Amino acid sequence: MAPVQSAEELRARADALGWFHRIDLGQGVVTNGLSSGPYVGPDKMPELTGKSVLDIGAWDGYYSFQAERLGARRVVALDHYVWGVDLGARQRYWAECAEAGVLPDHSRDTTDFWRPELPGRAAFDFAKEVLSSKVEPLLADFATVDVSEVGTFDVVLYLGVLYHMKEPLTVLERLRAVTTEVAVIETQAVSVAGMEGQNLVQFFGGEFIGDYGNWYVPTMAGLSEWALAAGFARVVPQVVPPVATPSLATRVRRVLSPTASTGPTDHPNLTYYRAVVHAFV
Ligand SMILES: C[S@@+](CC[C@H](N)C(=O)[O-])C[C@H]1O[C@@H](n2cnc3c(N)ncnc32)[C@H](O)[C@@H]1O
């Protein structure tokens, strides 16, 4: 890549790429990412100084670069899906499925929607270059890769990925296998009024928050039980579940139209939030 000369050029070249993360590239330029995160600030990270770190589902690498900044000795950014899938083509296919009232064929992600030149990694590559980062990209589907090829890491980041897993317990066992100290797990979670402390998991066979690839949403207790069942020894929540209260929009809608429901998430007892836990080996 030709070196970037000025803030204007950096801004123009960053804007020419599609971003999920908002990454500070320096010179006052922050990428215009779509993510509503970050959900895990430095205060929710374990000590990273001198640690080896694996960031599973790294996308543009926000958390990988953060780990490097926080003193990690080695950082590997692993991803698969968004780096190689033509998300535009897949989105058009999903819209057709929604229109036709049928569920999408997910196997198309790795066949006709797969782009081996990895267009979705361009933003990560650009940020890595601009930041003079030593983060190592690794193309792998963590749900199926031979974990012995991935190796083991002191700290493993598993942020915003669990709800995409069809077999979450199996994947959490794989997460345990690559972790030697602590895994940081961040996920969409649900708080259920009247059932605080119950280990529950809500299943979405269709789509959830506009994504057909979202399957399971646990309560905090459900997430902890999952991690313990996968072989982690101790789970420490970093975000306290909110008291489950319906949103203002939901309350207004229920007053105006008491019998209307927009789907399985539209219930006055359910409040969704992003849970963060540290799972220790
Ligand atoms: C919602 S994004 C979260 C990105 C980032 N970790 C964050 O929290 O901002 C989910 C990421 O997980 C990745 N992902 C999903 N399934 C994966 C798998 N089986 N192996 C590796 N990455 C996966 C996606 O490609 C995507 O980058």
Image: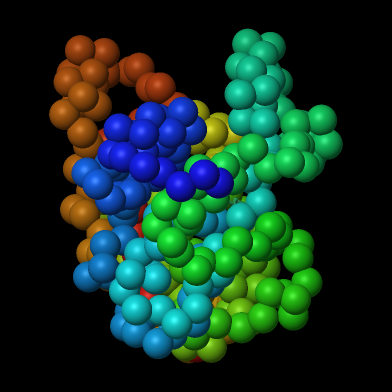
Vertically, is 109 above or below 239? above
Which residue does the image show at 71% across and 28% down from the upper left? 104
Which residue does the image show at 38% across and 22% down from the upper left? 261
> Where, by quadrant of the figure, is residue 245 drawn?
top left
Q: Is residue 110 visible?
A: yes
> Where, by quadrant of the figure, is residue 175 drawn?
bottom right
> Where, by quadrant of the figure, is residue 137 drawn?
bottom right
Residue 164 horizontal side relative to residue 255, left or right: right
Of 6 and 165, which appears nearest the observer?
A: 6
Give the residue furthest to the right: 111
Vertically, is 145 above or below 70? above
Which residue does the image show at 74% across and 80% down from the upper left? 148
> What is the tally of numbered marks visible in this picture?
0
What scheme was used to colour the molecule? rainbow
Q: Position of residue 72 (x, y in %)?
A: 41, 79
Vertically, is 175 above or below 209? below
Residue 116 horizontal side relative to residue 9, left or right: right
Q: Position of residue 193 (x, y in %)?
A: 26, 50
Q: Is residue 236 visible?
A: no
Q: Position of residue 52 (x, y in %)?
A: 49, 82
Of 175 and 8, which appears nearest the observer?
A: 8
Of 128 and 21, which appears nearest the observer?
A: 128
Q: Position of residue 216 (x, y in %)?
A: 53, 50
Which residue does the image show at 38% across and 76% down from the upper left? 278
